[in-house]
Amino acid sequence: MTPGRGRGGAGRRGVGRRGFPVGVGLAFVGNFAGCFALASGQAAPPPWERRLEATLPPPTLFHAPLAIHLPTAATLGPGEWQFEISHRFYPPLSAGPEAFWGLDGPVNIRIGMGWAPGRGLLVTLARSNVGDNWDFQVKKVVWEGHWGSLPLAVAGLGGVALEADGGRRKTLHRENLQGYSQLILNLGLGARGALGLVPSYLWNARVEDEGMEGRGALGIHGRVGLNALLALEGEYLMGSFPGGDLHPLASAGVELETGGHFFKVFLGNSVGLNPGHVLAGSPFPLAFRQLRLGFTITRLLRF
């Protein structure tokens, strides 16, 4: 339809039947509607304006799934794998040059592989040469959010272990089996700090003894980032350790992070690696002369 030639039009562009200018009328109506909307405060938001409240991203507290001996609430991305190798040197640093300050002597080793089948879920299978201990565990993040202004993450971990070198027992004897459960609470402190609390329970804490006694333990650990690559870590594990000849654990060291890969070097009084050994306590008391060197290397794998 040609402008100005509507039904009953006079044939002249922009002029109605009574000669009133249509453009002026539309402008008057538009200005009046705009003034009314501003006065009433009911102006509609523009289409790009956010309609919902902004949500905070999940907190990133500890970067690695494992601190030194204690687990964190961190996992991997869905479908990712992680290879781990850990060493605990048996001679103490106080052995001096005869044992090359702890490096020349027996070594306890753990090798493991973790897989994340989904977000917040991590499955790990590992073996330690201490007692030929095989360990299978599952960790699940159950909540991520904030406690006031502080980021908080909560996870649960459960696992079973088989001490294949059970001495006089057959390999699959029931008293060679262990089970454990851990509640993981991680709290962010400032831009670079994090604190972890890990209440734990170990079933059949002393595989070498008759009976299957369980014990509880409480782990505390922390991390302070120095920059994008380096961080300081420390942890302490206390509990009602069985037998009276086992002691609390303490460790401290440095973490180097490069693109999801971690290299940790630390000193501590423990030579255990798998949770079935760590949660049972250390055979060495917490003293300067009992400090031993250890390291953990993890590598992120994507297939």
Image (spheres, helix red, strand yellow):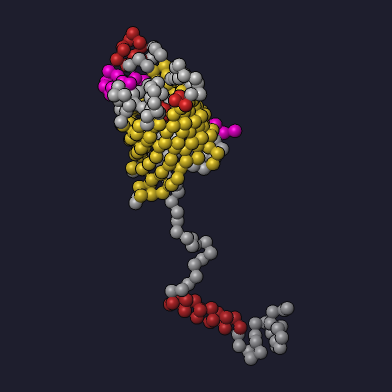
Quadrant in which residue 200 is drawn: top left
Q: Relative to 234, say whether 59 is above or below.
A: below
Tell me: residue 42, above or below residue 68.
Answer: below
Does 72 lie within the magenta span?
Answer: no
Q: Closer to the camera, 101 or 11?
A: 101
Residue extending farthest to the right is: 1
Of 162 and 198, nearer the camera is 162
Residue in the image at 37% along x and 16% along y? 90
Residue 285 lies left or right of residue 59; in this view the side is left
- In the rendered image, the residue lying farthest to the front is 211
The residue nearer to you, when weighing 184 against 229, is: 184
The residue at the point 41 percent across, 44 percent down is 153
Residue 115 placement (x, y as % from top left): 53, 34
Q: Quadrant of the N terminus?
A: bottom right
Q: Which residues are magenta?
A: 283-303
* Vertical arrangement, residue 150 with respect to residue 135, above or below: below
Q: Visible in this render: residue 269?
A: no
> In what quadrant of the picture does the C terminus appear?
top right
Query: Which residue is most to the bottom?
Result: 18
| Residue at x-position 43% and y-position 74% | 41
User: Residue 108: horizontal and vertical position, in percent?
Assistant: 42, 19
Q: How many marks?
A: 0
Find out whether residue 289 is within the magenta segment.
Answer: yes
Instruction: Let me know if residue 16 appears in the view.
Output: yes
- Residue 66 drawn at (x, y percent): 42, 32
Rendering coords of residue 208 (x, y %): 40, 21
